[in-house]
Image (cartoon, grey):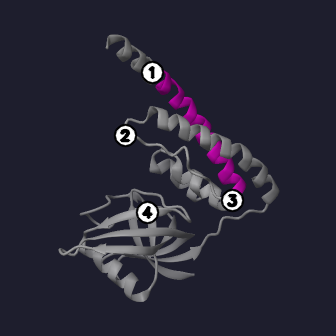
Amino acid sequence: MYTLPLFPLDTVLFPGMPLYLHIFEPRYREMLRACIDRKQPFGVVLIRQGVEALGPLATPHSVGCSARIMEVDRMEDGRSNVTVLGDERFTILEVDRAAQPYLVGTVSPLPLENPRPLDVLRGLRGLRCLVRAYLKQLASTSTEGLDLTGLELPDDPLNTLHMAAALLQIPTVEKQPLLAASTAMHMLAQLERLYRREMAILTPQLAIAEEDARRQSWLN
C-alpha cells in the first residue's frame, strides 16, 4: 500500500505501454514537478465522472496504472510534453481531494494473476492471429495512413495481453474492464471476444472501401 498522485484522463494506460501527454493546467504542472523531484511515478486513471481538464477534480475508476516518467520537454510558458511508460496496475483504496490541488490516492498493487500459464500460452496463439488480421483490416480501412501490420507482439505472455489491449481501437469505457481483469485468462477471453467483434465490424467497411475504389477507378 502506498500513496500516488492521480491523473484522471479519458485514457486507459496498460503496463509496458507508452503514453504521450501535454500538461498545461497549473495543478498538473505542480504534480509533474513533485513527481520529478521525488523521482516517483503518478497514476493514470480513467475518468468515471467529470471532465479531463479545466473543471472540478474528476471521479476516477478504481483500477489504474502507474506511469513512469521517461522524458519531459518543457516549454517556455510552463507547459510540458511528457512521455510516460505504464508500470503496474493498482487499485484505489482511498482518494484524498484536500491535501493537494490534484487527487492523491492510497493504492494497492494489483498484479495480473496468471494461475494457468499453459492455457494462456495456448490461447495466445489464436490471439496473435486475431491481432495480425485486425491490424491488416484496420490499415485497409484507415484514411489516415495508419499501418501497424509490421508490429511485432512481445514474447512475454502478459506483455502480449497488454499490447493487444492497447492496440484495440475501441472506446475507453470498453478498455477499462480489460485493465481491471482479475486474471490473465479472463483478460485473454475478453480480448478474443473484442477482436472478433471489431473484425466483424471492419469487414463490411473494407468491402465498401474496395467498392468505392473500383467506382472511382471506373469514373476516372
Tally of marks: 4
Rounded to the nearest angstrom, the CA distance separating label 2 from label 4 is: 20 Å
Residue occupying image coordinates x 55% and y 47%:
150
Rounded to the nearest angstrom, the CA distance separating label 1 from label 2 is: 17 Å
Q: Position of residue 14 (x, y in %)?
A: 53, 61
Rounded to the nearest angstrom, the CA distance separating label 3 from label 4 is: 21 Å
Viewer-side label of 2, 4: 2
Element assignment for label 1: helix
The image shows residue 183, relative to residue 198, as above or below, that is below
Residue occupying image coordinates x 42% and y 16%:
214
Quarter assignment of residue 136: top right
Residue type, numbered disc 2: Glu
Crowding at dot 4, Cα within 10 Å, few <14 / some 14-19 / many 20+, comes out as: some
Element assignment for label 3: loop
Residue type, numbered disc 4: Leu
Q: Position of residue 61 (x, y in %)?
A: 47, 61
Which residues are drawn in magenta? 184-208
- Mark nearer the N terminus (3 vs 4): 4
Q: Which mark is residue 19?
A: 4
CB under 8 Å between callouts 3 and 2? Answer: no
Q: Give the quadrant of the N terminus.
A: bottom right
